C-alpha cells in the first residue's frame, strides 16, 4: 500500500514539475516577445552626425531614441529630440532614412515667442535660465528678431551654440511636431543618460 501511495505521490510531483516548467517557459517567451516589441517599435538607435551637439554628443556616437515619449505628452523645454528635417520637394517623411535624422535641444514651445539678444534667450519677453552651461552664442541669426511659434512648432538649438545648424538658420526652420521621432534618452558609448555638455570632453570638440 505504501509503495502505491509513494508511486502516486511521485506522479503528482512530476505533473506539478511539468506544469511549473511549462508556466516558466510560457512566461519566458512572453518576456522575450515583449522585449522584442519594445526594441522593435518603442526604441530606435541612431548615430549622431556632425558637431552641432558637442560637447554633449559627438559625431559618430550612437544614441537611443524613445519613440513613445511623445505619443501622449509633448516635448518639454531643454529635452533633446530626434527628428526628420523638412522634406524637400518630391520627398516624404516615409522616404527618409536614418542618415537624415537630426538631434537638437528644444528651446521654444508652440505658441511662444523666441528671441536671442546678446547671447541670452528670451521666451515671451522673459530671459530664461538654462539647466546647463553652454558657450556664448556669437550670432542670434533669425532670432535677433522675435520668432513666433505656431501650433505644433518648436524652436531648437544646437548644444554647440556657435554651430548655427538649428532654428536660427533660415534654411533649417522650426521643427514641426509630426517630424519628431522621439526623445533621445541614452548614449551607448560611454553608456549614460542624456544630460548637458561635458566639460571634461571640451578638448574633443576643439
Image (cartoon, rainbow, N blue to C red):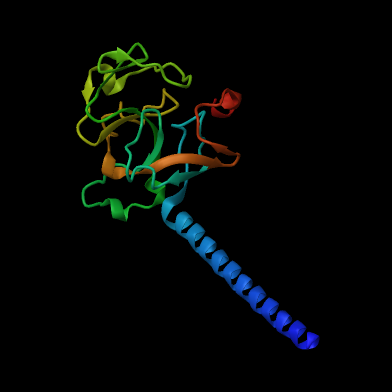
Q: In this view, does 46 lie to the left or right of 12?
A: left
5 shown above or below 183: below
The residue depicted at 26 percent of the width and 14 percent of the height is 125
Quarter of the picture containing the C terminus is top right
* Of 19 and 44, the residue lying toward us: 19
The residue depicted at 24 percent of the width and 46 percent of the height is 88
Question: Whole-percent x and y of residue 137?
Answer: 40, 18
Q: In this view, does 196 lie to the left or right of 77?
A: right
Question: Whole-percent x and y of residue 62?
Answer: 52, 44
Q: Residue furthest front?
A: 1
Residue 166 visible, this orientation: yes
Residue 49 visible, this orientation: no
112 shown above or below 68: above
Quarter of the picture containing the N terminus is bottom right
158 shown above or below 176: above
Q: In this view, does 164 lie to the left or right of 58?
A: left
The residue depicted at 30 percent of the width and 55 percent of the height is 95
* Of 56 and 164, the residue lying toward us: 56
Question: Whole-percent x and y of residue 204?
Answer: 58, 29
Question: Whole-percent x and y of residue 93?
Answer: 29, 50
State which quadrant residue 140 falls in.
top left
The residue depicted at 27 percent of the width and 44 percent of the height is 178
Amino acid at each position: 500500500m505504501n509503495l502505491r501511495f509513494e508511486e502516486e505521490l511521485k506522479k503528482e510531483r512530476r505533473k506539478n514539475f511539468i506544469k511549473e516548467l511549462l508556466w516558466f517557459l510560457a512566461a519566458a517567451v512572453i518576456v522575450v516577445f515583449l522585449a522584442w516589441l519594445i526594441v522593435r517599435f518603442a526604441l530606435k538607435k541612431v548615430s549622431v552626425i556632425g558637431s552641432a551637439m558637442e560637447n554633449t554628443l559627438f559625431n559618430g556616437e550612437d544614441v537611443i531614441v524613445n519613440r513613445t515619449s511623445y505619443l501622449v505628452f509633448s516635448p518639454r523645454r531643454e529635452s533633446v529630440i530626434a527628428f526628420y528635417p523638412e522634406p524637400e520637394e518630391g520627398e516624404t517623411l516615409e522616404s527618409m532614412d536614418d542618415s537624415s535624422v537630426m538631434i537638437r535641444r528644444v528651446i521654444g514651445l508652440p505658441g511662444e515667442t523666441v528671441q536671442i539678444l546678446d547671447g541670452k534667450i528670451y521666451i515671451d519677453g522673459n530671459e530664461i535660465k538654462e539647466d546647463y552651461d553652454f558657450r556664448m552664442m556669437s550670432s542670434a541669426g533669425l532670432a535677433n528678431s522675435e520668432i513666433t511659434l505656431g501650433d505644433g512648432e518648436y524652436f531648437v538649438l544646437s548644444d554647440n551654440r556657435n554651430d548655427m545648424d538649428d532654428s536660427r538658420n533660415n534654411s533649417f526652420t522650426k521643427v514641426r511636431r509630426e517630424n519628431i521621432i522621439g526623445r533621445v534618452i541614452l548614449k551607448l558609448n560611454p553608456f549614460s543618460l542624456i544630460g548637458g555638455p561635458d566639460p571634461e570632453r571640451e578638448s574633443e570638440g576643439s
